[in-house]
Image (cartoon, rainbow, N blue to C red):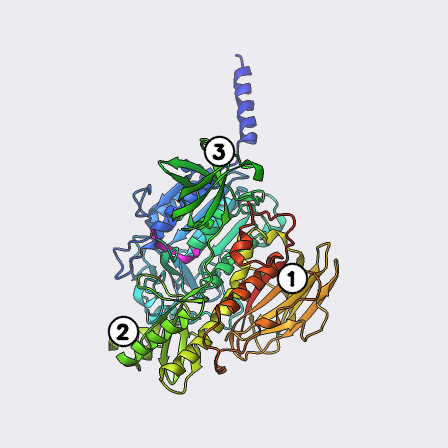
Amino acid sequence: MNMLPKICLLLSCLVFSVVAKAEKRALLVGVTSYPQLKDADLVGPKNDTELAYQVLVERGFQKENITLLSESEKASAKPTREQILGELEALVKSAQAGDFYYLHFAGHGSRQPAAATDNTETDGLDEIFLPSDASEWDSYIGAVKNAITDDEIAGYLDRIRDKGTDVWVVFDSCHSGTMTRGGSLQDVRYRQLSPASLGIPESAYGSASGSVVSRGWNDESENETPAFSLMSDLSASDSNNNTRGALIAFSAAQATQTTPEMRLPRQGDERRYHGLFTFTLMNALSQYKGLSYDQLGQYILGQYRMLPWRNSQPLISATDLNATVFGEEPSSIKIWPVSKAGKELVIQAGQMQGFAMGTGVSLYKSVVAGEADLLGTAEVVKASPLSSRAKLLSTTVKKLPRQVFAVITNPVVDFSLSVQAVASKEMTADQLKVLQQVVAEVTKGSPLLRQWQAGDEADLRVSMFENSLWFLHADQSLPCDQQLLNAEELASCSALRSPQRLLNQPVDGVRKAELVDAAGSGLNRIARGENIVRMQQLVSHAGLKGSSKIKVDLSMTRNGRVQAYPTTAIPVFKEGDEVSVTITNISKKSQDISVLYKDSRYGITQYFPEQSGEVNRIEPGKSVTIELELYPEPEGLEDLIILSQPATGLMQDFAFLEQEALGIATRGSALLPTGSSQGLMKALFAAAGGSGETANEAIGKTRGGKRKANVEVGAMEVYRWEVVE
């Protein structure tokens, strides 16, 4: 009997198994419909999964390797418990060493008491994800029927990783108490169902520490976990087992925080409901290649600052935060394919890649073409999240070739914040009308502000009660007793509204002139403070993030213990805690270093140089260390802003940006002269880009993230923390 064919066949199989190409697979779960739960339906999760599908395909995932479970017509099945667990089991069976799995869960979350035999939950609670067939608490089984627990998902992840497959899991869900809509975003929903709404009785919790008490984002717990704490059980086998796959876990919020969905992008004709976390994550994946998970986390936190959204803190964790996303090499060139559709050009990039109506682009014949190969220019006339249409403005050739590529050369950057007047329970109709007139006058007189228009989302809202003007950010609402609610709504508001710190400016009366002065003073201080932080994203957009001339090392001392400073989280400090900042000039030229501190009430102080004449010019290879002792006066979120400028002539700093905190009356500062605000933007971008032009003009000199050789580049870094009593 001739055994050679069988032996050859066996060998060929062995060889094939060794050289089999690593696969990238994805499971996308979006639950919008909950037929067995009252008033629980969402809108955004279906859109989230469709968006994630498009982005993953762009990033090299094969369509046949992406499983979509949602109510979408494009989905392969409904997101029921059986279907979700079945797909996870299939992933376990197909997993091989070197594979990469991306798992995305969008929908409602909640908490339930852990089983009495479960000693892995230190707080006695299980985090749960609710599939579409979830129903209420079943006392017989001691669980929410058809819910999927964090322990179950962790079990599948362990089995997949044991085969050498890397796993990135994303949860855009939450289960905490939330706010009502009084003065908050008009179309925001929250991906949470309270335990009470699921019919879980208080008696079911026993001695569990979490029960049904809802807490806010400013809790003092230092051991807060994400809604699905999958990173909390990284055993010693992870550090000692080189064959086990990596785990990356992104959660939209801490265990007691809200996770919103809203119409995004915030401006434009094609806004759809999306989870804020999913949309921000996909925005980054669409724009940047080669980011580490640590850098990706920092980008997401930066985008939350820009909204601004303070009611959630995404948590980023990984077995190796320095690993690059999808294992890809960095790419600084941002150039996009273009096709023709009649008289218009269709660009394969949209709002998520920085395109907006009015954005100017240059056209080239290849991705490596130089300035001499410019084919023409165009301007975007319509932008959707992932594609744009543009009109041709000029050409250097008689006819554009079939293959054309676009690069943003004149991005549209809007630094203005929209402001809306909202009524409180104390206000009369006439007082609301006066406040609306005040907002109109203040916004008309400041280029950093614009008046809210119906159909848009306001960045800031202003109301009046208790002899003060009150300023609300996008994720804040009026106190329950100041909202126009009936008895039932008031009771619900009081039970669910998250604790919030609202900014206020005392006023002596309700005369229009006094209100204009107070509102203008407060709103312009907020706008200046927000725009200083926004500049970091502008610098990043210009492709300068990887060109920093400084290296920043931070450490923190909490409760007398020195710890590493977390780059993808917002640490919480108490009185007497310290932050140590060491800034090193890693360039070949001297740099003028400035350090600004912005408190929670928008007071801005220059920490370094501390006084006029102090030397802040740092020579190449030299460092400066600054020690900060923190005090909760006032409490809240604070920003440390580090700026460097290439040294030219006299030393430069940013003391001119200093301002008193909100609540300290400053007469005569209601309206900013146009020139002063333009000067602010000029100076900030000059610090970041070594240019004296306006922000848009200076960015217009970029191509594919590279600036002209004669432009010196500085740096800008922003670090945020919270101080509590």
* Mark whose residue sits in front, 1 or 2: 1
The residue beneath circle 2 is 489
Q: Are marks 3 and 1 in contact (CB under 8 Å)?
A: no
Residue 338: quarter of image: top left
Please name whichever residue, 708 or 688, is drawn nearer the observer in this view of the structure. Answer: 708
Q: Are marks 1 and 2 in contact (CB under 8 Å)?
A: no
* Mark whose residue sits in front, 2 or 3: 3
- Left or right relative to 587: residue 19: left
* Mark whose residue sits in front, 3 or 1: 3
| Separation of marks 1 and 2 at Cα, in angstroms | 51 Å
Q: Amino acid at mark 3?
A: Val
Q: Secondary structure at mark 1?
A: strand
The residue beneath circle 3 is 397
Q: Are marks 2 and 3 in contact (CB under 8 Å)?
A: no
The residue beneath circle 1 is 644
Task: Note whether 295 is above or below 634 in the view shown.
Answer: above
Does residue 273 show up magenta in the picture? yes
Q: Amino acid at mark 2?
A: Glu
x and y, in percent, of residue 609 in the image: 67, 71
N-terminal of the pair, mark 1 or mark 2, is: 2
- Residue at the limit of the structure toward the top, as seen here: 1
